[in-house]
Image (cartoon, rainbow, N blue to C red):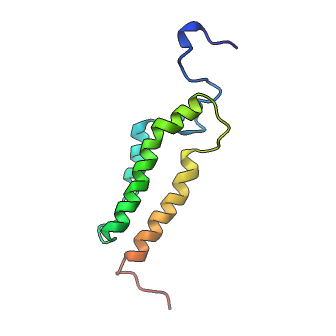
């Protein structure tokens, strides 16, 4: 179906579903990363790199949304990233937690 002239600049409905970051708002991406902050006991240098990844995720909104809005066969979406990043965040926190007893 051909779009009407008033909607020529809107994203193609075929590519703008919930499958990619285009289904998320900038605020939702920020909310995703807000809950994945490392504890203060993790060294600053490690937290700085972790924060860099968190910021890249948030700001990906501006380039991935363009890619999905204008058509792409790239498979990339928030859930594919969030699960592994949650696991990595948890492992980093455990690695530096001095209150955890090592297994015997």
Q: Position of residue 67 (x, y in %)?
A: 57, 34
Q: How many marks?
A: 0
Q: In the figure, 12 relative to 83: above or below?
A: above
Is 92 rendered above or below residue 31? below
Instruction: Kindly indicate the quadrant of the structure image that contains residue 39.
Output: bottom left
User: Is residue 24 found left or right of 13 in the rendered image?
Assistant: left
Image: 24 above or below 82: above
Residue reaching furthest to the bottom: 104
Q: Residue furthest right?
A: 1
Q: Position of residue 20 (x, y in %)?
A: 57, 39
Q: Residue at x 35, y 64 (%)?
A: 47
Q: Choose between 83 and 7: the one closer to the eye.
A: 7
Residue at (55% x, 59% y) in the render: 84
Q: Residue 78 vs residue 45: left or right?
A: right
Q: Residue at x 53, y 32 (%)?
A: 66
Residue 34 location (% of width, % of height)? 37, 51
Q: Quadrant of residue 12?
A: top right
Q: State the image coordinates of residue 2 (x, y, percent, origin top left).
A: 67, 12
Q: Say which of 35 and 48 sits in front.
A: 48
Q: Residue at x 37, y 76 (%)?
A: 97
Quarter of the N terminus within the rendering: top right
């Amino acid at each position: 179906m051909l779009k009407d002239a008033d909607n020529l600049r809107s994203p193609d409905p075929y590519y703008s579903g919930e499958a990619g970051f285009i289904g998320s708002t900038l605020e939702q991406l920020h909310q995703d990363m807000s809950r994945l902050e490392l504890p203060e006991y993790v060294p600053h240098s490690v937290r700085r790199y972790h924060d860099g990844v968190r910021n890249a995720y948030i700001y990906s909104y501006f380039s991935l949304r363009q890619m999905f809005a204008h058509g792409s066969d790239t498979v990339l979406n928030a859930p594919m990233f969030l699960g592994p990043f949650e696991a990595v965040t948890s492992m980093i926190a455990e690695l530096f937690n001095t209150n955890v007893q090592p297994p015997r």
